[in-house]
Amino acid sequence: MSKKSKKLGKKQKDFTAQIFKILSKEPSKSFNYKQIAAVLELSDTKSRNEIIRDLKILKSQDKIHETDRGKYQIISKSEYYEGIIDMTSRKTGYFVCDELEDDVFIPFINLNHALDGDKVKAYIYNRRSSRRPEAEVLEILERAKTEFVGVIDIQKNFAFVTTTNAKMYTDIFIPKNKINGAQHGEVVLVSMEDWPKKADSPFGTVIKILGKPGEHNTEIHAILAEYGLPYDFPIEVETYANKIDTSITEEEIAKRRDMRNILTFTIDPKDAKDFDDALSFQVLENGNYEIGVHIADVSHYVKEGTILDDEAYNRATSVYLVDRVVPMLPEVLSNFACSLRPHEEKYTFSAVFQLNKKAEVVDSWFGRTVIYSDQRFAYEEAQAIIEGKSDIIPAEISLTGATYNVPLPIVEATLKLDELAKILRRKRMANGAISFDKVEVKFHLNQNAEPTGVYFKQSKDANHLIEEFMLLANRKVAEFIGKQKKTFVYRIHDEPNEDKLFGLQNVITKFGYSINFKSKETISKSLNTLLEEVQGKKEQNLVDTLAIRTMSKAAYSTENIGHYGLAFDYYSHFTSPIRRYPDVMAHRLLQHYIDGGKSVNEEDYEEKCRHSSDMENLAAQAERDSIKYMQVKYMQDHKDEEFLGVISGVTEWGIYVEIIENKCEGMCRIREIKDDYYTFDEKQYALVGEVSKNILQLGDEVFVKVKNADLVKKQLDFWYLRKNE
């Protein structure tokens, strides 16, 4: 059947959702078909007959009962909940509700136009033919999104937009007068405006043309548009930012602690354009060390109530895609005024600590400062200093054929900071912190942003040095406010989900590992042991990924429950205000309380925390999509090569394989594995050959070849070649 005939063909209407909605609003009242038709404003005979039919069906399903002849009422044992729709890729979904112990299955027929992420009111019931409960959507309370990215298919009198999102089970109908200049086959952003009761698809309008499918900028902009993320600033925001006075004045310096004469430097990625943080170091007369963690004073420039602040809040975070950064703040601030660039004076917000030789904090100070950065290091340069410490302290370091002259005081400071950071890290691990040093996939890009190679970013001592002092500042700032019992923005992380931990246990036992469930402490210790033992092994990325999935998501909240992963009772985000709005809020609140201000309204800040957490999640999804896109693009040029991979997932429709040398993941479909007829064994989490009894399970090494690399869907399909025996 053509799309046109599918849309315009007549069929009986299902009034189930509307009937439920009417009866559930007044559960003590009975209705006949005439009353229901009147509420629905239906007077034609056909519609009334369909209502009578649906009432009888609902009665046969024990969802409603007949109180009197022709009069119906919701069964009192019926249960109604509000929750979120979590769609699968098979046109079915799950109803997720905090009040329910488990997610509840929703067959397609019961979705009633609900889409992934929508907040809905649902009815839970038990089917006679199945022991498991099912849900039916009665009302859509709030749409998760109304804008979608897809490819437009233009017909003679109308068009359809088909999205690439596997969870979006319907295309979007576009009337001819709302195509707005789009050409057939282009990638567009559409706004869903209406979904008439009798229509199979929602109606929408094209609001932006993104370009041709497969083109680099089209796909990157499509990723951002899919998650509602901007890629440029409104002109009025740019204009406002460009007019800000960014000069360093004597009047402002007089209001701050002047730390310009103390040795200060930054350590960042070599390709970083903005520098949030700097460290200062000096040895005190008592033999202790004064270490300053200096953070860009964004709140000095970004004032509450301005259009600049509104824009920063709406974005809530910078977005780091493979080939670009979409900043939270305009460039005049993020790359210049707020960036702690070398040999420039900058306004900062600082946490200054006095540490003894055991890395114990004996004194703390928080407040606004002015600094001068003496040196800018890349992590690789700082690492070279650290790795050379067993020799005579070098005055020079050599990297990639170039020699850098490093003043001796900076070398000595770097080595001492490294020593103290290692002590802080050991203490943190001993207290139960989880050491997630997951391998990050990075790409070598040419001038056209084409991937020419894949490499892996791993944390070394220089990364850990910065990490430990940022963690110290975040922890101590949160502790300082938290012990005053005043409203603050915390970074929280709940304990891991026990069911997910048992699921992880089932997988890792295949590799000879295990988790000790005796106590919270033994779980943390065994997770750390697991992550150490898989280092460098074929299953490392799989185990790292699964272990991270057992963890609860970190989030922002005014309710402090501590941070499980870091083993901190108090924790906040204070150290990256150029790229995170919660850090800006933390700076403002800290200054407010230093000035003697009263505790602020908790509900207002909790709403801001929720928004920041939501935007962080969207940015993370966009970042993952950009990596997938670049992996697919990279593999397009390697279709004739054989790759050794590890089976990273097993389903009834095939196996997922992650290539060892570049971490690109794709699927081998079960029907295309030709050396036997395979069936899915749920207990073994494996595919089993009927004749050979060959087993393909998690962690097995197999050889594959690229079958298809789909840039639009960001999806790789592999040919299965053979198992690596």
Image (spheres, rainbow, N blue to C red):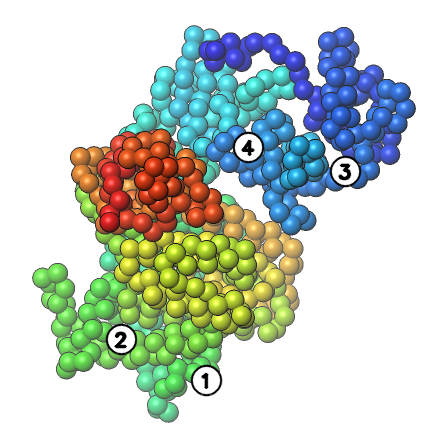
Q: In terms of sequence position, does the residue under pointer 2 or pointer 4 come before the other?
A: 4
Binning the other alpha carbons within 10 Å of mark 4 as few (below 14), some (14 to 19) or many (20 upward) gives some
Q: In terms of sequence position, does the residue under pointer 3 or pointer 1 come before the other?
A: 3
Q: Considering depth in this image, is 237 or 482 the residue closer to the camera?
A: 482
On screen, residue 47 above or below 715: above
Instruction: For marks 3 and 1, give the one nearer the viewer.
Output: 3
Q: Give the residue number, with chain letter if any, for mark 3.
A: 78
Q: Taking 438 as reference, is 493 left or right?
A: right
Which mark is drawn over residue 92? 4
Q: Position of residue 123 (x, y in %)?
A: 70, 36
Q: Taking 644 as reference, is 587 left or right?
A: right
Q: In terms of sequence position, does the residue under pointer 4 or pointer 1 come before the other?
A: 4
On screen, residue 202 above or below 463: above
Q: Position of residue 593 (x, y in %)?
A: 57, 69
Q: Position of residue 169 (x, y in %)?
A: 50, 28
In the rendered structure, which amino acid carries the disc numbered 2?
A: Thr
- Give the spatial CA distance, label 3 vs label 1: 61 Å
Q: Give the residue number, with chain letter if any, for mark 2.
A: 414
In the rendered structure, which amino acid carries the disc numbered 3?
A: Ser
Q: In terms of sequence position, does the residue under pointer 2 or pointer 1 come before the other?
A: 1
Which mark is drawn over residue 651? none
- Give the spatial CA distance, label 4 vs label 1: 58 Å
Q: Residue furthest left?
A: 401
At 54% from the left and 73% from the top, the residue drawn is: 480
Binning the other alpha carbons within 10 Å of mark 2 as few (below 14), some (14 to 19) or many (20 upward) gives many
On screen, residue 6 above or below 536: above
In the rendered structure, which amino acid carries the disc numbered 1?
A: Val
Q: Considering depth in this image, is 681 or 631 the residue closer to the camera?
A: 681
Q: Give the residue number, with chain letter if any, for mark 1.
A: 362
Q: In terms of sequence position, does the residue under pointer 3 or pointer 2 come before the other?
A: 3
On screen, residue 618 above or below 430: above
- Give the spatial CA distance, label 3 vs label 4: 22 Å
